[in-house]
Image (spheres, rainbow, N blue to C red):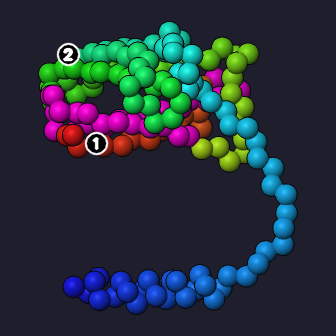
Amino acid sequence: MKVRTLFPVVGLILISLILFGARPLPARALTRLPATVIDDFEDGDSGDWGFFGGNLAGGGGGVLSDRPAEGSFYLSTGWGGEGTASTFYGGFFRNLDNAAQVVPPADPWFNVWVLNQSDATVDQYTLEITIREDLDGDGWTDGSEDSFRLDTTFANA
């Protein structure tokens, strides 16, 4: 109950701070760098992606066009296994040749769209996204600075 009675007051204070604290800023030109796209699948091809199975599990994927978040195509994957006994179902990856390495901007961000349809074998699953980049030139397998990881848990759909 405290949250409900305090919320309008906090919201009013926040809105007041925003309204009364706002003042015009001097105009300045912004430099917007072009986006670096690893793959938008607009070529309708997933042949440069590799898939591997896990413990008592496996899967694969391909490009579909029935419900992309943007554009005309998206990468659809499907995974199956022995439920909790499988622990790890598998994954997919894309390697870039040294000549095709992405040069990220100073403040990079990563965007991915996930449509969760996990209703077959488990109550929930964890999606791990790992990006590997050799920041200091000693090889991407030598150093924690080379791996950026996000784990997100999805409940049964």
Place residue 2 in its image quadrant. bottom left
Looking at the picture, how far across and down is residue 81, in whole percent? 19, 20
Q: Which residue is painted at 36% across and 83% down in the image?
A: 7
Looking at the picture, how far across and down is residue 53, in whole percent? 31, 15
Q: Main secondary structure of the magenta part?
A: loop
> Which quadrant is home to the N terminus?
bottom left
Looking at the picture, how far across and down is residue 71, in whole percent? 53, 30
- Determine which residue is flagged by label 2: 56
| Residue 60 within the segment the image draws in magenta | no
Is 77 left, or right, of 68 in this rendering? left
Q: Can residue 77 be seen in this view?
A: yes
Q: Is residue 54 visible?
A: no
- Please give the range of residues in magenta: 110-139
Nearest the eye: 69 or 129: 69
- Disc 2 residue type? Leu
1 or 2: mark nearer the eye: 1
Secondary structure at badge 1 equals strand
- Determine which residue is flagged by label 1: 154
- Disc 1 residue type? Phe
Nearest the eye: 102 or 71: 71
Place residue 152 in its image quadrant. top left
Q: In this view, does 75 lie above or below 155?
A: above
